[in-house]
Image: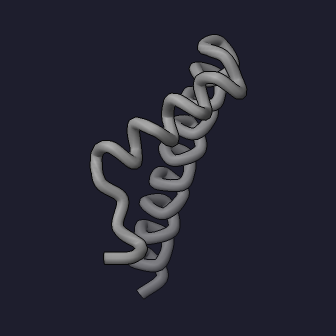
């Protein structure tokens, strides 16, 4: 089925990313991605609270 990534495909992509960026740069990228997701979720939560107060 096209468009579905299984465990072997994900491991291959991670191995290639590790070869390209190296372990320290890959850790920094993961940290930045995690912070971005966390900030996005907190912004969405703040936005929901703001709309409830206006109603």
Give the x, y percent position of residue 37.
Answer: 51, 47
26 w.r.t. 16: above or below: above
Query: Could you say which is closer to the camera, residue 16 or residue 34?
Result: 16
33 w.r.t. 53: above or below: above
Give the x, y percent position of residue 47.
Answer: 51, 68
Query: Could you say which is closer to the camera, residue 53 or residue 20?
Result: 20
Q: Quadrant of the N terminus?
A: bottom left
32 w.r.t. 53: above or below: above
Give the x, y percent position of residue 30.
Answer: 55, 30
- The number of numbered discs placed on residues in the rendered structure image is 0
44 w.r.t. 27: above or below: below
Please give the name of the residue rendered at 35% of the width and 67% of the height, measured from the top-left corner. Answer: 4
Is residue 5 left or right of 15 when viewed as pictured? left
Q: Quadrant of the C terminus?
A: bottom left
Query: Could you say which is closer to the camera, residue 35 or residue 17?
Result: 17
* Color theme of the render: one colour
Please give the name of the residue rendered at 48% of the width and 82% of the height, measured from the top-left corner. Answer: 54
Q: Residue furthest bottom?
A: 55
Query: Could you say which is closer to the camera, residue 2 or residue 54?
Result: 2
Give the x, y percent position of residue 15.
Answer: 51, 29
Please give the name of the residue rendered at 64% of the width and 23% of the height, measured from the top-left corner. Answer: 19
Q: Residue furthest top?
A: 24
């Amino acid at each position: 089925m096209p468009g579905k990534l299984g465990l072997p495909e994900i491991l291959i992509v991670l191995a290639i990313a590790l070869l390209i960026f190296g372990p320290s740069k890959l850790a920094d990228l993961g940290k930045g991605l995690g912070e971005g997701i966390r900030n996005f979720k907190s912004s969405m939560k703040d936005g929901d609270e703001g709309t409830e107060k206006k109603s």
